Image (cartoon, rainbow, N blue to C red):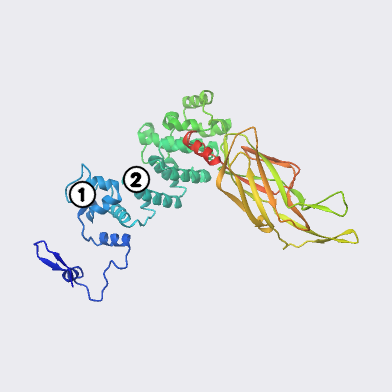
Amino acid sequence: MASNKENSDGTDVSTEEIDDRTNKGKSPTERPWQEDKGVPESLLYAYENSLWTDVTLECTAENGDVQFIKAHKMILASRNTVFEAMLFGPAADKGDIIQISTFSYELMDLLLKYLYSEKTHITESTARPMFEMAYFYQVPALINLCSQYIQSIFRDDSVCGILELALLYDNVGLRNAACDYIDQNAITVIETDGFLQVSEMCLEYILRGDTFHVAEKTILRRAIEWAKKNEIKDGLNKDRNLDKNKKNPSDISVKHFKSTLGNAFQYIRLGAMSVGEFSECVESTLSAEEIKDILKFPKNCSTKEFHPHRLPKKETLEFKNGKTTWSSCQKSSSRNSGLFSSSSESMYEITVRKSLIICKGITFSEISVLVDILGERFGSMQTTKAVDPNLDFTVKMNIKIARTRLNYSFITTIQDLSAYDLEFDSPICLRASEDPYKVVVKMELQPTPLNITFTTNQCGVGSAEIENAKVEWNNQFSILHKILFSNTSNRVSKGKERKKMDDDGK
């Protein structure tokens, strides 16, 4: 028996009549649109088809036309705190139409589609404005999506502007990714027009980096060009009736170089340049008085960042070539017996000279294998040597670095080990210390009656070094080929970021 509901006038209406109204205009065989959709898809369908809407957003399209977006108060407020305040807060707009002037119709449409469905389509042209819009409307998940997309489209000419954006919104992930790209491509990034377009704050942040690895004379030259551009833009340089639209005019001098650069000036390592390099950069662009003032700066400067040479972001410490061997059978004093061992340990000492360096991974030496098959005949030892390039053994490797949390093990074969590039899941932070970090590398195989001799291509004793670290080893079976390091930029001062590095290194 059909159930009944009431009409607005109090009369009864049957469920059959309700079904007729809902599916009006549909063929008897047409399925309701809700059947094959989940909740996000159904909400998006209702938005895109303006079903049962109760609020209208008035926006201006990119072409200047006024456009209207019909939406649902309950959905917007339940998905976003800004819309909740806008629609139901103490200062809520009580009208049916709400004017949106901050962002275009096209961007608002993308935002609402994301709020309804948690899906969006980001392009290179929309990524940055969507990033800003996500911050304005406080949508963390959309911020992360935009940040990830922006990181995938870094280019030399745009990455400085992206760093500026990250600094403006204090987005640490995007900031660090942009800095890594800038540091690893410093030689080309510094020559782009995008570098000259950054603010004083962003310029300071870039130049502060110890890992902004480019010749200091190039940095000074481009800093002077940046100052020229900004003096003209700000109207500080009135020489020769300059055209403000003219880019980097080479026939003018910089009137206020130090003051135009502001705090960024102190991060130019003048001490890293020769007198000739300095003169080449400044003789035709800075006044004699400005040059004299600059040359006083090293004597008065107390910053530790001033004198050191800049460092590459990534450095590889490579061990010396040579030959070392280890045998699983060590002969005893008895001529008919030997002492078998299933493991070998190699030890290395890393001394960090200055600041902080990050150990990111290691690679192993090529290893060749020689097998002696041992047997006894008439009380004497019979030996047959077998050399097979395809001969292989399974080994368990363990790497430890004392005073850090690193204790990493894995199982592989000898042949695979030679091509194994081990990158640690979390980089290991090593601080400057007179007490070296001890690295122990253990190779373990199952006990076997075979005398297996392993030979590597590395010296059994020696040392190797990079700018901020030195590794030493002595009289051993040397199995490491390279250690992969990353230098820290020291851009963020010693507070929160250094604490995080300490926590990571525990």
Q: Where residue 108 sits: x, y (%)?
A: 28, 52
Image quadrant in which the C terminus is located: top right
Q: Residues within 10 Å of mark 2 (few under 14, many from 20)?
A: some
At 18% from the left edge and 71% from the top edge, which residue is drawn? 2
- Under tag 1, what secondary structure? strand
At 22% from the left edge and 55% from the top edge, which residue is drawn? 68
> Which amino acid lies under the numbered mark 2 shown in the image of this protein?
Tyr
Q: Where residue 355 sits: x, y (%)?
A: 57, 34
At 36% from the left edge and 57% from the top edge, which residue is drawn? 121
The Cα atoms of the two marked residues, 1 and 2, are separated by 20 Å
Q: Residues within 10 Å of mark 1 (few under 14, many from 20)?
A: some
Mark drawn on residue 135: 2
Whether residue 416 is situated above or below residue 237 in the rendered picture: below
> Which amino acid lies under the numbered mark 1 shown in the image of this protein?
Ile
Q: Where residue 277 sits: x, y (%)?
A: 56, 34
- Under tag 2, what secondary structure? helix
| Residue on which the image places disc 1 | 98
Q: Where residue 197 sits: x, y (%)?
A: 41, 41
Image quadrant in which the N terminus is located: bottom left
At 24% from the left edge and 53% from the top edge, which residue is drawn? 74
Query: Is any atom of residue 221 visible in this view?
Result: no
